[in-house]
Image (tube, coloured by chain):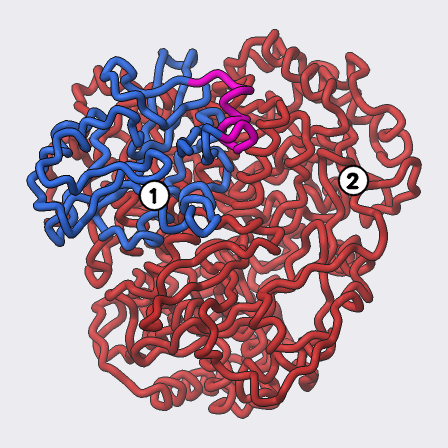
Chain colours: A blue, B red
Amino acid sequence: MRYAMAVDTRKCVGCSDCVVACQTENNVPIGFCRDWVVEVMDGTYPQLEMEIRSERCNHCENAPCVRCCPTGASQKIEGGIVVVDHSKCIGCGACMASCPYDARYPHPSGYVDKCTFCEHRIKNGLSPACVAVCPTKCLYFGDLHDPNSNVSVVLKRRKFKTLIPEAGTNPQLYFLI
Amino acid sequence: MTSRRDFIKISALGTGVLAMSSGAYGAIKLISSPEDAKKLRVDLKRTPTYCEVCFWKCAGWVYKTSEGKIWKIIGNDEDQHSNGRFCPRGTGGVGMYYDEDRLKTPLIRVKERGKQVFREASWDEAFEYIAGKMKDISSKYGPESMTLFTHGSGSAYYTNLIKAYGSSNIAEPSYAQCRGPRDEAFMATFGEEVYSPEITDIRDTKCLVLIGSHIGENMHNGQIQEMSDAIDKGVTIITVDPRFSTAAGKSKFWLPIKPSTDIALLLAWIHEIIYNDYYDKKYVEKYCSGFDKLKEHVKDFTPEWAYGITTIKPDLIRKTAKEMADASPSVIVHPGRHVTWYGDDTQRVRAIAILNALLGSWGRRGGFYRPAKFVVPSAKIPKFPEPKKTWTDAFPGKYPIASSPVSNALIDASIPENKPGLLIKGWIVNGTNLISSIPNQANTIKAIQNLDIIVAIDTMPMEITGWADVVLPECTYLERYDALRISPYRKPAIALRMPAAEAKNNTRSGYNIARGLSLKLGLEAYFPFENQDELLDWQLKQVGSSLEEMQLVGVKTSEREADDLYFAENEDVVFSTDSGKIELYSKAFEDAGYDPLPKYVAHEEPAEGYYRLIYGRAPMHTFGRTSNNPNLTDLMKENSVWVNPKVSKEWGLTAGQYIWLKNQDGVVSDFPIKVRITERIRWDSIYMVHGFGHGQKQMKRCFGKGAGDTQLITKVLIDPIMGGTGMRGNFVTFVTEKTDKEVAS
């Protein structure tokens, strides 16, 4: 099992629904977020192009945050999901410094927090909160080892890219272009 | 023209909706319903609601934590409006409930208006005070001198109250400040409006044309969902906008038009479609009237002619016209929603309606579908008294085509020096912040100063509540029952809203407030049910359901009576226009003294150093209504002024710098606004999101954050046809030095 997510940049409108749905689902304190929206502009008026991306933890195959964590709080669980065991985290911030995607934030309660792919939901057969809410249905989630999963199907059909592949982390967040 | 107005009223009811929906509720099956199951169900883990953050009214579920606290709101999978997916504002609706700045208890003013010195009052005392003033107005001026300005779900109850009292002045700013020109233009052309939610069949369209409409930044849920589905299916999107909107970024063609010249472009498209024989001949012949006159009218409106006006190259105009024709009839030239721009808006939307008619999209798959709607019986109440005067008597002969009361006309009628034929002396303002929703703030404040009573009903301490004599705090939609949602859509459906929590503080629901006032006015016969849940249960039982059932399912959808979502092949359709045809040439407009066919008229342009003020929406806010919502403020806490890099260079502006905006009349924004330097806006315009720059200190999160466009809209271009307030004829320049204006800390 290898969980992954694909984001269709042709459909994403950057509304931030993924952000607020994650915040309410996971009780992320106001002022922090586990996912966010990036808008990239290119060109000069009126020859313009725009890419909008919903971003979050890349749940890297080769995750620097897991490697550098001194207490083992940052760890991989089933399906390659990277999580932080809050009880083991001492809030040292080494993982935050090592993450090329700036995907983690310091929770006011003293630990580091991040996207879990809504592991508590997927084990009950639900999709992550951001995927479930997205009005444009631009987020695809599933098991890459299952050729019929949403994410496998769409990655077969469409061109895609990953962010900062040169970091060598083998990210599992794909952007359909 | 009175007859025309009356005709429109009747025809609005006579077409489509009612005719198709009669008996549709028979599909709902009755289940047994114990009498004791009607009250707040504390045992439910999730309770049904429909959203109140915008007018799309998506149905969903409010989930609570194991401690019973409101946790999250999720779409109801059975609901056509949301398909189980809420937009960011609906998802963030929990913030409306938790906002600690909410109004908490009734207030009565103790110092002069606008000073905002109030004392706390009991509900009984507040009702007594309002009823006393209303009785005075009734005996001194007649009940017609009361006006209701209203928005949102509570409207039904306050409308019932004000009609029972004897006035028909019920104005929604959503008409003359927003969609009114669209409604009248489509009514004049097709004999039918486009409703809300709009009947645009975006999911099946092959070509979607957006004229300044920014789907994706306005998060009208069904439209954004369907646009996304259409993108998956390879739709061609054509966006006309001086700004590179999000939708423009998804478009095959973006036409970066010079602002205020849209009619020229539309006429050139009509010219191309007619003179290249692109139009749907069979459809036009069968359903339309006035084609020859239209053809003659647009003879000279070539793409070359339009190029000089719009700055859009002729080949692009030709290519996009062909693109629409190739998709016909599965093409939508979108009617838009907020269309009060330049004062000739009804004519601009008429051109849009005509274009749709030529392409044969009305009544066709991928164009405009026929809506269906439930009919739910209302409670039996006495007949309303007949008002001796209506809002049209205030300024006789003005706005002859307006089918709804015009808010700005009623505000003008509150100022004695305007010598109105009907002087307005009292306002009840429900859920609409008139200071921010009506342009020309000074005029609104002047009107308020002439009133005998102004009551503001809201959940938040908005600017308008600061001007009120009595402030009535409503509870949020998460703490109340409301009228059933029975909006027209593809299938007839009903949705229930019920309280997920007890009303916080000393707040009450709209129904309870209106009924409470009715008791003091001796009008309780118009509210025969003491509590709304009893009314809802009675209504639902009339259609074979019950409150108990709806509490468990939230939404009930039934099939249409007939397979008539679109016109059948060769169907004989009688349109509710005077001629029974789609009127390309409007005889009704001609009779009223207006152009029967749309014409392009040049509009004023900005002076040297000034830029046209264009405003719009952000996906995570519904105007000022959400600007203090803790969850949504977290996503966007202030607006910024979009400036083209050429302009910022000329002015030496830097990204992130705070500046003030000054308009053509010398009005300077109260608060500074952050500069956003972006290629996404034309060099002759600036852009800002509406709904920021609040001056109410009681709204701590949004006070002084960003600038308010309404403050800078002092020049209002009135649409003579229906009274709409065109707001895009204002120009601003930059003030970089700190002024003596109040600056937020």
Chain name for mark 2: B
| Vertical relation: B117 (above or below) B189 | below
Question: According to the image, label 2 marks what residue?
Answer: B363
Q: Is residue B7 visible?
A: no
Dot 1 amino acid type? Val
Is residue B489 found inside the magenta-colored segment of the image?
A: no
Report the span colored magenta.
Answer: A146-160
Chain name for mark 1: A
Residue B368 shown left or right of residue B166 in the figure: right
Real-space CA distance between mark 2 and mark 1, rounded to the nearest whole angstrom: 38 Å
Q: Is residue B366 visible?
A: yes
| Vertical relation: B252 (above or below) B455 | above
Question: According to the image, label 1 marks what residue?
Answer: A19
Percent position of residue B611, x then y: 33, 26
Dot 2 amino acid type? Gly
How many marks are shown on the rendered structure? 2
The answer to whether marks 2 and 1 mark residues whose Cβ atoms lie closer than 8 Å is no
Mark 2 crowd level (few <14, some 14–19, many ≥20, 10 Å Cα)? many
